[in-house]
Image (cartoon, grey):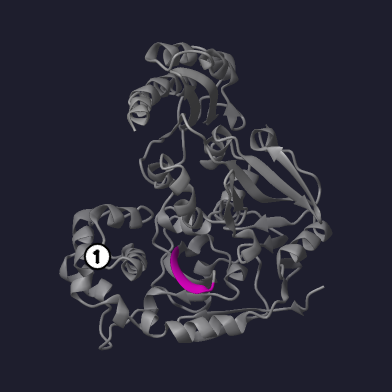
């Protein structure tokens, strides 16, 4: 049993914060604005969509200190234990004047009403620290999670291109003080379990993975919070009163990515940003899709395991992973059980869960020769939007014939689901447009989609069928290229 600590500790700009009393669902945004009067961080949407509340959070990861942009409006305060929070008020130039990002925004007219500007500055700051000479694509990716209603993005992008003309990241205060900040965070690590109580509500931060397995048994009704990108909205939009939260975003044992000759095993606590490089290396078809998942701030917070455990029929990752043949590793105390990911989803809002268990990892088979992959996301907005329909294809072709087909959809049923009738129609057929069209015609046997605010049932079925043709057009040259090599 680890020792118990009854406060959270983190650095806010240059000040050490120690709190022994706060609600487990108090947001960083509310704390900054209401208690610290750091009002540069704005509340716009309160759901992680507009980016006006963007701050940087520094954390220790694999022996280094990294800073990432996050949405303060859905980041719960207890999750910041052991972190360094940097707000717009913490920025400064080397001469005490404006920071290079701020000066570039001024000189290139990147602000009008100014409400969204602090969040944009913080997103560009995070980008500049890691990529001082970014391409336009990288700039647009960094700004996916920031909405500006009046300026337009052209002057903001011009400012982003110009930042390094005003200074170098090497002379930035965060870089100059990196060693000191690293030591500050090391000093906060004490290996204790944190239990924070406030008005009958509790926040629990387990000391490690084994401690989490014990806490989960002791608190089977508690809500597990990894990135809070969904749970945060339960508080800010649904006004739910959450009693006991178990935070796991800090558990490094759940942030491993292990690659073997046959599988990639991803810890349930790995964020989208952390997983992107490893997964895209084996599945390059996911690289563009990855940038369609929310915005950078959400990808820095949200986890692969959380997206699965949430069980949403329109989650981005389940169709992709089901098509790849992924397994789910569930743990209860010291016991593990492994199930096919597709079998985890039983019905709308219902998963194959035992009391006291949790998602520990996801295992993805590494594809063999002849594998064709594709994934398509249809949404009203290109960036930072929820799927109307999402489909992932995994076909194995040998001798010109389809010997294996796995096709999974999101948004077409009450759960993420394979198109089993369409798959059966493809097996043994030549990889051709006619075969893909015939398989698409079987989709009404697999799905009876609903109409809702995102799309009508008719639209969903029509676009789902069209994506079979799109996949063929995208992949028809892949096999001839492979044969030539």
Q: Please state the horizontal and vertical placement of residue 398, each as a whole percent of the image.
A: 48, 22
Image: 198 above or below 477:
below
Query: What's the residue at 38%, 20% (across, down)?
Result: 469
Camera-side residue: 184 or 194?
Answer: 184
Disc 1 crowd, CA 10 A, few/some/many (<14, 14-19, 20+): some
Residue 156 shown left or right of residue 416 in the figure:
left
Main SS type for the magenta part?
strand
Residue 401 shown left or right of residue 151 in the figure:
right
Quarter holding the C terminus is top left
Camera-side residue: 159 or 39?
Answer: 159
Q: Is residue 110 visible?
A: no
Query: What's the residue at 65%, 40% (across, down)?
Result: 327
Q: Is residue 432 visible?
A: yes
Residue 470 shown left or right of residue 25 in the figure:
left
Report the label total: 1
Q: Please state the horizontal and vertical placement of residue 49, each as a whole percent of the image.
A: 43, 52
- Identify residue for label 1: 133
Q: Helix or strand or loop: what does disc 1 sit on?
A: loop
Q: Please state the horizontal and vertical placement of residue 191, each as a whole percent of the image.
A: 70, 77
Residue 460 forms part of the magenta stretch: no
Which residue range is magenta in the image? Answer: 63-69
Quarter holding the N terminus is bottom right
Image: 244 above or below 33:
above
Q: Please state the horizontal and vertical placement of residue 12, each as a whole percent of the image.
A: 49, 80
Query: What's the residue at 58%, 54% (across, down)?
Result: 258
């Amino acid at each position: 049993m680890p020792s118990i600590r009854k406060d959270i500790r983190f650095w806010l700009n240059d000040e050490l914060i120690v709190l022994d009393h706060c609600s487990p669902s108090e947001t960083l945004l509310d704390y900054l604005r209401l208690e610290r009067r750091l009002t540069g961080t704005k509340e716009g949407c309160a759901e992680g969509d507009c980016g006006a509340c963007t701050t940087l959070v520094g954390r220790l990861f694999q022996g280094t200190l990294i800073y990432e942009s996050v949405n303060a409006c859905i980041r719960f305060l207890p999750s910041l234990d052991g972190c360094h929070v940097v707000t717009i008020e913490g920025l400064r130039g080397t001469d005490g004047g404006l920071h290079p990002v701020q000066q570039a925004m001024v000189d290139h007219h990147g602000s009008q009403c100014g409400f969204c500007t602090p969040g944009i500055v913080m997103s560009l700051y995070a980008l500049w620290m890691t990529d001082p000479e970014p391409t336009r694509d990288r700039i647009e990716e960094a700004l996916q999670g920031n909405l500006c209603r009046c300026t337009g993005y052209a002057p903001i992008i011009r400012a982003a291109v110009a930042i390094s003309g005003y200074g170098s990241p090497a002379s930035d205060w965060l870089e100059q003080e990196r060693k000191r900040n690293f030591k500050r965070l090391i000093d906060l690590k004490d290996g204790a379990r944190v239990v924070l109580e406030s008005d009958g509500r509790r926040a629990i931060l387990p000391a490690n993975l084994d401690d989490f397995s014990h806490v989960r048994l002791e608190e089977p009704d508690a809500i597990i919070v990894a990135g809070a990108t969904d749970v945060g909205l339960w508080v800010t939009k649904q006004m739910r009163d959450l009693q006991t939260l178990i935070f796991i975003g800090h558990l490094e044992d759940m942030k491993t990515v292990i690659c073997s000759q046959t599988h990639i095993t991803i810890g349930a606590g790995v964020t989208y940003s952390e997983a992107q490089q490893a997964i895209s290396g084996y599945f390059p078809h996911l690289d563009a899709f990855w940038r369609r998942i929310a915005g950078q701030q959400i990808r820095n917070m949200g986890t692969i395991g959380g997206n699965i455990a949430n069980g949403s029929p329109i989650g981005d990752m389940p169709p992709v992973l089901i098509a790849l043949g992924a397994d789910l590793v569930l743990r209860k105390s010291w016991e593990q059980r492994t199930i096919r990911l597709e079998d985890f989803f039983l019905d709308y809002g219902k998963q194959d869960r035992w009391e006291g268990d949790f998602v520990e990892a996801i295992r993805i088979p590494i594809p063999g020769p002849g594998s064709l992959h594709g994934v398509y996301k249809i949404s009203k907005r290109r960036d930072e939007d929820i799927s109307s329909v999402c489909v992932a294809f995994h076909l194995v072709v040998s001798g010109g014939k389809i010997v294996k087909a796995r096709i999974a959809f999101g948004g077409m049923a009450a759960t993420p689901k394979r198109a089993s009738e369409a798959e059966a129609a493809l097996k043994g057929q030549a990889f051709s447009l006619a075969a893909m069209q015939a398989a698409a015609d079987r989709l009404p046997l697999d799905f009876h989609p609903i109409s809702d605010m995102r799309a009508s049932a008719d639209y969903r079925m029509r676009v789902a069928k069209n994506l079979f043709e799109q996949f063929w057009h995208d992949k028809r040259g892949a096999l001839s290229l492979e044969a030539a090599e």
